[in-house]
Image (tube, rainbow, N blue to C red):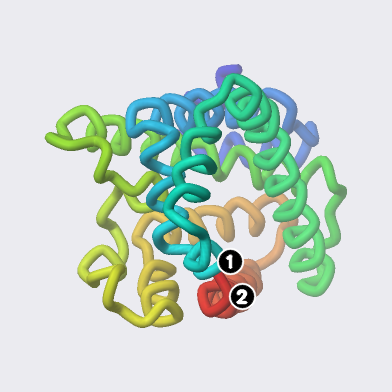
Amino acid sequence: MAALIEIFYSPKKVFEYVRDQRAWAIALIANLLLMTAFLTGVQHAIGLENIARQQMESNSFTKNMTPEQKETAISQASTPSRQIIGLVATPVVIAVIMAFFAVLYMAIAAMSGGPIKFSQAFGAANYSAWPFNVVTAILSCIVVFISADRSELDPQHLLAFNAGAFMDKATASKPLYALASSFDILILAQMAFAAWALSIVARISLGKALAGLIVIWVFMTAIRMGFSLVF
């Protein structure tokens, strides 16, 4: 438990602990609890129906729906069953994402000459994500709290730390907007921090770890741009 606090002022010690003890459980639980509470709270503050309306207005698949069909779909967004599904699905999705990145960390480490176990990679992924999840949650809650009209907030873009924040989402090219949004200060900082964590856990150079994560970032950005053309 102390490692969750030490990561803010003595991260190297924490990552060495992860490497030697293959620790990950506490960090995973902390991330799941924090992000589930944060995302659920933000969704309810903005309004599930407002979020559903925003998504339908920007989704190409719903353009052909009649106004009545759209209103019916929007009204169903806040039903108890949908809320329960969202509450259960959120931690599952987060855990899967963390496991996915752990596998990628293992691949980078193996190609860099420092193979590691899944438990070590999983620990590196969770502990390196924790401080950024805390900062994101705090800053996002402040934005929601001081907002004059919460119904107009976009839950996916609450913080203006990326180039996309300075573009008009309604008129900008979707691929260009997706690319600009990927140049996010917090995301890039987390990537650098994760690379440092991986270099310690896998005993590889920081350059190799960072190069591997940059390749992943470029690949995921390209996928995000591709999806923006469809959805």
Vertical arrangement, residue 166 with respect to residue 139, above or below: below
Q: Position of residue 222 (x, y in %)?
A: 57, 79
Q: Position of residue 27 (x, y in %)?
A: 64, 29
Residue, x 79% and y 36% (percent of image)? 22
Frontmost of labels 2 and 1 is 2
Which residue is label 2 attached to?
A: 223
Q: Is residue 127 left or right of residue 97?
A: left
User: In terms of image quadrants, where is residue 149?
Assistant: top left
Residue, x 28% and y 44% (percent of image)? 153
Q: From the image, which quarter does the N terminus lie in?
A: top right
Disc 2: CA contacts within 10 A as few (<14), some (14-19) or many (>=20): few
Residue, x 65% and y 59% (percent of image)? 199
Q: Position of residue 89 (x, y in %)?
A: 69, 34
User: In terms of image quadrants, where is residue 14?
Assistant: top right
- Tell me the number on the disc at residue 206: 1
207 or 48: nearer the eye?
48
Element carrying mark 1: helix
Residue 9 seen from this side:
no
* Disc 2 residue type (three-letter): Ile
